[in-house]
Amino acid sequence: GDAEITLEAHPDTVTEAGLQYLAQAGFNRISFGMQSSDETELVQVGRPSSATHTSHAVALARAAGFVNINLDVIYGLPGQTIDRWIATVEDALALEPTHLSCYALTVEARTRLEIDLRRGDGVEPDAVLQNTMEDEAARRLKDAGFQRYEISNYCRPGYACRHNLLYWQSGDYLGLGPSAQSYLDGCRFGNVEDLDAYQQALAEGRLPILDTEHLSPEQQRREAVVFGLRLADGVDGRAARAGEPGGDWEDRIQRLARQGLVEEQSGRIKLTDLGRRYADSVAVELL
């Protein structure tokens, strides 16, 4: 069939033989964590790697038969200037991927950056600079023929990531392996993180599930709207209001519209340019 079978890989870890084996096994999409083409920036976030490894990994993947190739890049890295970010975007485009994911740096617990910040050895990401970087990337990627179909994701025509779309369109998905997350029939659940515990549960005939959350029909509807708003096409206005005409829900939508965060056009509710900046705040308001 034409199923999208995708994997993520660190550019330093792939081999010619390994990629050929994966392609022969049926994998047809690969995502590399490029992050930056500046080696100083990579070191500062705890990833001592040569920026040339990504270009080598992409070449190996293409030689193995992969056509659908994504690169993840991050803006707002410590010490990153707008010129360095532009260089990363241009270097990524030079590798001719079919898809690019551009993520704003966030400080995650127990990472090297978070530890450095707690010790006073770093500075928080500059939100204003990150906004400028986002705008610059969006402009350059549009000029290069990429479509922005989701807040952080850009693709060449026909190469939108199917599993990403499944998340944003509230479809069912099953995650296999340690830490994998799933969503089936209104139930969200995640597997244990530890590989040994995962294997032991399976050996004992138990599902290796750690956390489970059952969503009510109303929660499912609201999440469908919140996730769907991340897409450039937004959500169907009638579907967004189904089950709760008027009332508090409608008040919230109208309040967000007055704030310039959402707009309704041709029956669809979408985030505005400003709304994309504050997508998390919009989500909190609607949930």
Image (cartoon, helix red, strand yellow):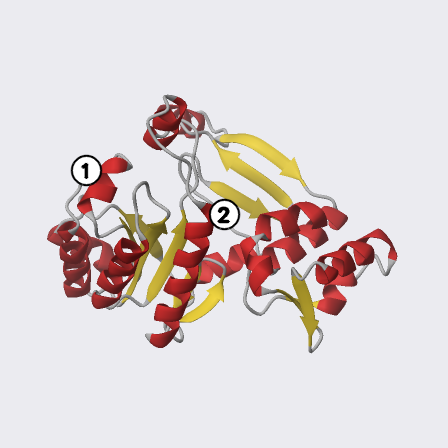
Image position, residue 141 (x, y; %) = 36, 69
What residue would you read off at disc 2?
174
Along the line of sight, which residue is nearer the eye, 72 or 30? 72
Let me know if residue 89 appears in the view.
yes
What residue would you read off at disc 1?
48
Dot 2: element: loop
Alpha-carbon span between mark 2 and mark 1: 33 Å
- Give the vertical position of 41 relative to 52 (above or below): above
Residue type beneath disc 1: Pro
Image position, residue 244 (x, y; %) = 83, 57
Residue type beneath disc 2: Leu
In the image, what residue occupies the spot 27% across and 66% down? Answer: 97
In the image, what residue occupies the spot 16% across and 57% down? Answer: 55
Residue 259, quarter of picture = bottom right
Left or right? Give the position of 253 relative to 131.
right
Along the line of sight, which residue is nearer the eye, 217 or 27? 217
- Give the vertical position of 48 relative to 145 (above or below): above
Lower position in the chain sequence, tag 2 or tag 1 = 1
Mark 2 and mark 1 in contact? Answer it, CB < 8 Å: no
Instruction: Report crowding for label 1: few under 14, some 14 to 19, many 20 or more residues within 10 A (C-alpha).
Output: few
In the image, what residue occupies the spot 33% across and 53% down? Answer: 72
Along the line of sight, which residue is nearer the eye, 176 or 70? 70
